[in-house]
């Protein structure tokens, strides 16, 4: 592919895809009790569910939007101002992630504080991929993408983990868990033996973000929209096939962010975005997409707002009808949806919670307030 780029313009399908992803994230995160609706549960270890696609979709979007925002600066001889902007946004995202980790108590215990997190990983991936994009060609980016996938597979399966041996892909004995425990104590890690947003698994997350970078370059290419859409469907299908084949020897696993998981989730992200692009930007069917557009244009705010609301509910405890104690979220679920099965009650709470978040982002949209970094 040659590097012929067209002028940037707002891509509605990208806002809609971003909105779809944030809605799915809220739906997954806000289950009303411990009995999650089956299709909204994360895979226990190997495998991939709908819930497992949310985070890689976000990283894919981060890479895609980075290209759109940075492409005018790529040819500049002096990029110092652009670098400062990238550093500033990365640091702000990382700090916001730390604040969310300690919210609502705002007490910092260096012996237990969780440094890793969703926004922290996004910040690191954005920083690395922005520098890669600004200083390399599309061919080099493709080679880096493939090199990360191969290198991660090589280390995870062929390099012995001290005390455990080679090809250790378990919760306790992989290179992911070994390095996470080498850097932090178990009290700093979300899963105690490893962190799903930990140190080593961030490397293949960079590859996921690079898949978005390469897609962004495709969108800015001078070829027709129909050809771009075809390429996205084609590459997405190839990624799915390769991820499925690799799964037999290097299982699809979100917690390890395995190379097969990168291909599988990036393939699904490409195909999902291609559908949005086809329906909205090519066929021009846009009326249905307004609610998702509203979420997508304030995705950062929606993410932070819904996490804060959930954590406030976790902090308050009430007695439940079975005599046990539960948090406010469980109490609301029992009060409003207690007549339904546990999993349906969890789902109905999530849908109600999405509606609440939608009312807030709709207000911001009507006031033309868009929270960005």
Image: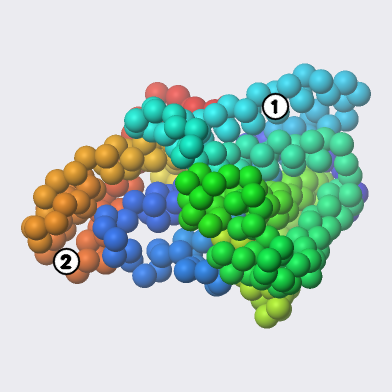
Nearest to the observer: residue 372 or residue 149: 149
Can the viewer see residue 285?
no
Q: CA distance from mark 2 to mark 1?
A: 49 Å
Residue at image point 70% right, 33% down: 69
Nearest to the observer: residue 192 or residue 236: 192
Residue at image point 60% right, 51% down: 181
Nearest to the observer: residue 79 or residue 224: 79
What colour-coding does the image apply? rainbow
Q: What is the count of numbered marks?
A: 2
Measured as percent of width and height from the top left, residue 86 is found at 70, 28
Q: Is residue 246 above or below residue 215?
A: below
Residue at image point 82% right, 46% down: 222
Nearest to the observer: residue 88 or residue 325: 325
Q: Is residue 62 above or below residue 175?
A: above
Measured as percent of width and height from the top left, residue 372 is found at 54, 28
For the C terminus, the quadrant is top right
Query: Which mark is nearer the camera, 2 or 1?
Result: 1
Task: Say whether residue 201 is left or right of residue 309.
Answer: right
Helix, strand or loop for disc 1: helix
Helix, strand or loop for disc 2: loop
The label on residue 340 is 2
**Mark 1 Cα within 10 Å, few/some/many (few <14, many 20+)?**
some
Identify the residue position indicated by label 1 in the image.
87
Residue at image point 73% right, 72% down: 166
């Amino acid at each position: 592919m040659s590097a012929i780029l067209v002028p940037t313009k707002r891509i509605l399908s990208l806002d809609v895809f971003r909105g779809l992803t944030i809605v799915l994230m809220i739906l997954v995160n806000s289950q009303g009790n411990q009995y999650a609706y089956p299709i909204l549960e994360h895979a226990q270890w190997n495998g991939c569910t709908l819930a497992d696609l949310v985070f890689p979709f976000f990283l894919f979007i981060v890479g895609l939007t980075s290209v759109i925002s940075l492409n005018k600066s790529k040819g500049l001889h002096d990029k110092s101002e652009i670098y400062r902007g990238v550093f500033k946004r990365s640091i702000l995202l990382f700090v916001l992630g730390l604040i969310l980790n300690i919210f609502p108590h705002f007490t910092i215990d260096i012996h237990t504080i969780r440094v890793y997190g969703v926004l922290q990983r996004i910040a690191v991936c954005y920083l690395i991929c922005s520098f890669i994009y600004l200083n390399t060609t599309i061919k080099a980016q493709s080679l880096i993408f493939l090199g990360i996938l191969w290198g991660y597979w090589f280390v995870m399966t062929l390099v012995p983990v001290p005390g455990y041996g080679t090809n250790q892909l378990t919760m306790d004995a992989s290179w992911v868990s070994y390095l996470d425990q080498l850097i932090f104590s178990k009290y700093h890690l979300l899963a105690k033996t490893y962190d799903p947003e930990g140190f080593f698994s961030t490397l293949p997350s960079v590859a996921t973000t690079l898949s978005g970078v390469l897609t962004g370059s495709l969108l800015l290419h001078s070829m027709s929209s129909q050809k771009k859409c075809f390429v996205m469907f084609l590459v997405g299908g190839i990624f799915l096939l390769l991820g499925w084949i690799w799964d037999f020897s290097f299982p699809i696993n979100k917690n390890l962010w395995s190379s097969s998981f990168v291909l599988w989730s990036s393939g699904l992200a490409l195909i999902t975005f291609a559908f949005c692009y086809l329906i909205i930007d090519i066929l021009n069917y846009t009326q249905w997409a307004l609610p998702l557009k509203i979420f997508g244009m304030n995705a950062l705010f929606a993410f932070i707002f819904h996490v804060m609301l959930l954590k406030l509910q976790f902090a308050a405890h009430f007695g439940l009808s079975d005599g046990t104690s539960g948090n406010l979220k469980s109490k609301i679920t029992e009060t409003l949806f207690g007549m339904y099965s546990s999993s349906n009650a969890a789902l109905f709470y999530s849908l109600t919670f999405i509606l609440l978040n939608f009312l807030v982002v709709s207000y911001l949209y009507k006031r033309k307030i868009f929270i960005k970094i």
